């Protein structure tokens, strides 16, 4: 007896799942005592399927929700479920309740995030327009859905289901607009800052709120069983909503301020309170007969928006929700979706009718409403196309109807196909109706077809007066906090001094002071770039960009810099995908008629500049150190994108590690090796403008190559035509007609993203040589030009030493002169043109020798750096001859 008792106790103490795979147990076998192993397998398969489909559909610019829904459908009875044993092994029916529990937990968290994403201020700012579009986008689809529900009910729905319930769910499914998916489509198509984007966001918020209210009413009516009970449920739900939006919201705001969550992000205690509130609201709404997701949605509306608190809360939750929980929910939808049930003509006829009626209701209602409100037909139709986006919100409605027994599996599958079709249609339809060249940003009036997108006012503002050729409108690009010192240094370089130094006060004449007053007032547009990712928090930042302008630390620092320097600084913030950073900068500079884009470039590390090739050179620091893909490599691709897409002059400031920005106000000397071409002519004008500052002096050397053999026998041959063509073929990114600024007639040449160009023709070289000679004469011999009467110009040129140098190795000669100046000058800034476009010579041979001299094998980024800043800039950085280098590229209006 005792032995039996002992063995019984030992058997009860056996660990669950002991042994496992090693003992031959099937890890996919489901047991109610240990469901975790199969759950992990299910989650892994679901996430991998969703991510693989997302990679494919991303190429078609489709939102991620389509990949998740398609993944669920493929894993269900439509595709993989037809494989013998797949469903029984991976998704056995007894395991689905566990999967459903986790999926519904995630759904509640997702609806909480949707509530956080909704900003009532967006609706308030566009209340009249959004109300008209939103109501029209609900009323007409609801009516069409109610009409279509009559034949659908008689053909496919069990008579035990009340027709009223089915009609309500059909109308709600037709009326809904997927606000979260809509935000992502607007961001992907770069419509967030357009008139259409603003009105669609506002109408989408209102549509979402009304849609969830209708869904709550429908669920309450179904669960109540009688109209009177449904009325009581509705009244309790309204009272609970008012209770949350008034006293509870006040308490949550007070608690956020008390705990410092608004200033410093949510504390652990505040996060705990928020999570308790979410589940308490979900429990209450589920208890009174309304779905739990409605309570979670209301909890999101209660969280205060001050200080970006809602954004920070979203950042803490969104990854787990979007990566794990939502794919689980959509897989459950896919397991309930069997497209094989659409197996006859009448079913397909009704499916097509569902799609057509749904699109006609949304598109027609919203288009007409927008047209009546004053939009043109193109903008109105785009609003209609965007509002017809369904996405995951309709899927949630459909799943609620399926779980309530209102929808049959066949009708559910028909509506899922309608959801996928309309969501997939949204992006290509909007691109066809509203191409980029026809888009109007907020505050812009309609422009005539073929007109300049900058507008007439900005076109005039961007013109540089030849009598006073000073660039005074700048766009400063701010990306990271680490770039602030370089951005300040470059900005301060181009500013006129607040007052001349005391030791040169006696030489400053009244005439010079008068000329200084004639120089146009400097204005700077500081553009902060924030990456727009797939995360909900990134979307929220884009919708509240106006408020982020006043709280962003990078912009705040630069704004204070402007105040200290009596500089007019206007701040802007752009939330765009990383791949669109360059395009956003180019368009921003165009809209604000900037004369020059100031772009900082800071290496990851900045030790002291080395003087010999045996130590870590400045090149190694700028290249980003060792590794296959350094941060600077990635940033250099972004910089090359700005060079390629900008239709404005660009100045790139490279801090090689000597902390140039820390003492930019002291006396400084500038060195420019002038080789010729549009970029060097821009660099020459830039140096002259720098020398308006009495603290700046400069040395400008016109470099000319002579094909001679030195005594040592080291000759440099002129590159062959074949070599030039090979290099052009490998580096070419785009071809466009070139119209150099101030070079006379239009000249056709090859323009590339990088600094490698096709071989110029004799005609293009003659035009460029003529422009080079004119620019050199204008500045090197001012008495022979119209600038002789300009005293500001005379004083600037008096601080510049011009000379000519001929050498068989001009890059080496320029590098030696830079080193000589570095030894005699405490602060040396090197200015160089980016490319040798339209110039006579190629530096390929010299660059090869320089790389052999200074470049240590194993350091990545050589070719990337050379493509980014050009041969001259690379040579200057390689030699470690300056604390900072400014590389300039002249604008070409034909560059796409």
Image (cartoon, helix red, strand yellow):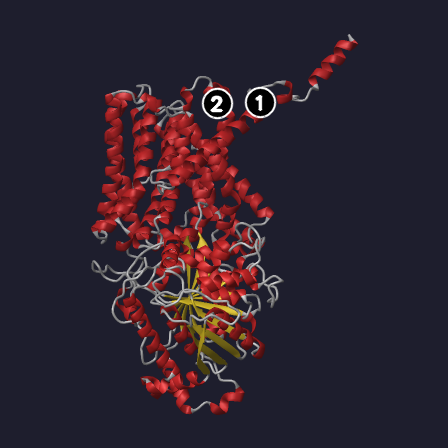
Q: Residue at (43%, 83%) from the top-left corner?
A: 796
Which image quarter is the N terminus in?
top right
In front of the other: 159 or 481: 481
Question: Disc count in the image?
Answer: 2
260 above or below 673? above
Q: Which residue is mark 2?
A: 91
Q: SS at mark 1?
A: loop
Q: Are marks 2 and 1 in contact (CB under 8 Å)?
A: no
Tag 1 or tag 2, which sits nearer the N-term?
1
Q: Which labelled disc corresponds to residue 27? A: 1
User: Is 214 placed above or below 813 here?
Assistant: above
Spot occupied by residue 583 in the image (x, y as percentages of width and height): 37, 56
Residue 563 can be seen in this image: yes
Question: Neighbour class for label 1 at 10 Å: few (<14), some, many (≥20)?
Answer: few
- Front residue of 581 and 206: 581
In this rendering, the label closer to the viewer, 2 or 1: 1
Q: Is residue 85 left or right of residue 183?
A: right
Which residue is situated farthest in the right direction here? Answer: 2
Displayed quadrant of residue 517: bottom left
Numbered circle sitting on residue 174: none
Position of 693 relative to 394 (above/below): below
Residue 387 visible? The answer is: no
Relative horizontal placement of residue 106, taking residue 785 as reference (left or right): right
Task: Name the residue at 29% across, 67% down.
Answer: 762
Q: Residue 117 at x, y = what percent?
A: 43, 47
User: Residue drawn at (73%, 16%), measured in percent from left and top?
Assistant: 9
How far apart are labels 2 and 1 at the CA level?
14 Å
Where is residue 699 drawn, in percent x and y? 47, 79
x, y percentage for residue 631?
Answer: 52, 54
């Amino acid at each position: 007896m005792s032995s039996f008792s002992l063995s019984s106790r030992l058997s009860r103490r056996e660990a669950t799942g002991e042994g496992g795979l090693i003992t031959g147990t099937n890890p996919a076998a489901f047991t109610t005592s240990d469901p975790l192993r199969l759950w992990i397998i299910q989650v892994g398969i679901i996430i991998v399927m969703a991510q693989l489909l997302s990679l494919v559909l991303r190429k078609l610019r489709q939102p991620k929700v389509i990949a998740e829904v398609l993944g669920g459908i493929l894993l269900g009875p439509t595709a993989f479920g037809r494989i013998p044993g797949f469903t029984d092994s991976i998704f056995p029916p007894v395991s689905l309740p566990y999967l459903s529990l986790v999926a519904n937990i995630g759904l509640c968290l997702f609806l909480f995030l949707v509530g956080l994403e909704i900003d009532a201020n967006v609706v308030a700012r566009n209340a009249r327009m959004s109300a008209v579009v939103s109501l029209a986008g609900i009323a007409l689809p609801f009516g069409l859905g109610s009409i279509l529900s009559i034949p659908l009910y008689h053909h496919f729905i069990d008579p035990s289901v009340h027709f009223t319930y089915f009609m309500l769910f059909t109308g709600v499914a037709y009326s809904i607009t997927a606000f979260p998916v809509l935000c992502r489509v607007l961001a992907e198509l770069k419509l967030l800052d357009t008139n259409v984007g603003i009105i669609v966001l506002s109408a989408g918020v209102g549509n979402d709120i009304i849609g969830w209210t209708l869904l709550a009413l429908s669920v309450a009516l179904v669960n109540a069983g009688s109209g009177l009970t449904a009325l009581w449920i509705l009244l309790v739900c309204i009272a609970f909503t008012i209770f949350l939006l008034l006293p509870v919201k006040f308490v949550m705001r007070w608690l956020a301020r008390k705990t410092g969550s608004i200033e410093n992000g949510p504390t652990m205690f505040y996060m705990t309170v928020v999570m308790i509130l979410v589940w308490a609201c979900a429990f209450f709404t589920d208890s009174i007969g309304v779905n739990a997701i409605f309570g979670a949605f209301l909890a999101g509306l209660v969280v205060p928006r001050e200080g970006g608190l809602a954004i920070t809360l979203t950042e803490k939750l969104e990854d787990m929700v979007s990566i794990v929980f939502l794919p689980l929910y959509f897989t459950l939808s896919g397991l309930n979706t069997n497209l094989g049930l659409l197996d006859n003509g009448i079913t397909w006829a009704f499916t097509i009718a569902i799609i057509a009626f749904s699109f006609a209701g949304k598109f027609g209602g919203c288009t007409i409403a927008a047209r009546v409100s004053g939009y043109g037909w193109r903008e109105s139709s785009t609003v209609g196309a965007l509002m017809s986006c369904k996405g995951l919100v309709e899927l949630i409605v459909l799943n609620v109807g399926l779980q309530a027994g209102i929808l049959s599996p066949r009708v559910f599958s028909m509506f899922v196909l309608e959801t996928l079709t309309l969501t997939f249609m949204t992006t290509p339809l909007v691109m066809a109706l509203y191409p980029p060249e026809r888009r109007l940003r907020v505050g812009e009036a309609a422009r005539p077809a073929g007109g300049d997108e900058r507008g007439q006012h900005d076109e005039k503002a961007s013109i540089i007066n030849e009598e006073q050729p000073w660039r005074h409108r700048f766009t400063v690009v701010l990306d990271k906090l680490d770039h602030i010192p370089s951005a300040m240094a470059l900005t301060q370089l181009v500013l006129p001094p607040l007052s001349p130094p005391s030791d040169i006060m006696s030489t400053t004449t009244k005439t010079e002071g008068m000329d200084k007053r004639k120089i146009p007032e400097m204005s700077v547009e500081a553009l902060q770039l924030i990456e727009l990712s797939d995360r909900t928090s990134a979307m929220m930042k884009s919708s509240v960009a106006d408020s982020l302008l006043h709280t962003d630390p990078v912009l705040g620092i630069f704004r204070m810099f402007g105040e200290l320097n009596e500089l007019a600084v206007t701040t802007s913030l752009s939330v765009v995908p990383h791949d669109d950073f360059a395009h956003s900068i180019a368009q921003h500079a165009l809209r604000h008629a900037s004369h020059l884009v100031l772009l900082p470039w800071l290496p990851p590390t900045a030790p002291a500049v080395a003087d010999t090739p045996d130590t870590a050179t400045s090149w190694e620091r700028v290249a980003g150190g060792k590794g296959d893909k350094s941060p600077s490599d990635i940033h250099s691709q972004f910089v090359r994108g700005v060079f390629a897409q900008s239709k404005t002059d660009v100045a790139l400031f490279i801090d090689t590690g000597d902390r140039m920005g820390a003492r930019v106000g002291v006396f400084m000397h500038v060195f420019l090796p002038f080789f010729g071409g549009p970029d060097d002519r821009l660099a020459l004008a830039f140096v002259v403008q720098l020398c308006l500052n009495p603290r700046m002096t400069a040395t400008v050397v016109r470099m000319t190559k002579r094909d001679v053999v030195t005594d040592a026998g080291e000759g440099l041959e002129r590159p062959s035509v074949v070599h030039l063509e090979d290099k052009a073929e490998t580096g070419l990114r785009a071809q466009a007609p070139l119209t150099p600024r101030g070079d006379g007639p239009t000249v056709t040449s090859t323009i590339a993203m990088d600094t490698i160009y096709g071989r110029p023709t004799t005609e293009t070289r003659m035009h460029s040589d003529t422009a080079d000679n004119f620019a050199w004469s204008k500045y090197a011999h001012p008495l022979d030009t119209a600038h002789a009467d300009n005293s500001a110009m005379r004083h600037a040129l008096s601080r510049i030493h011009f000379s000519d140098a001929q050498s068989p190795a001009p890059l080496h000669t320029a590098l030696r002169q830079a080193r000589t100046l570095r030894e005699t000058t405490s602060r040396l800034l090197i200015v160089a043109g980016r490319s040798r476009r339209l110039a006579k010579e190629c530096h390929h041979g010299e660059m090869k020798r320089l790389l052999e001299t200074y470049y240590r094998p194993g350091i990545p980024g050589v070719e990337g750096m050379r493509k980014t800043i050009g041969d001259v800039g690379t040579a200057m950085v390689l030699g470690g001859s300056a604390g900072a280098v400014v590389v300039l590229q002249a604008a070409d209006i034909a560059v796409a």
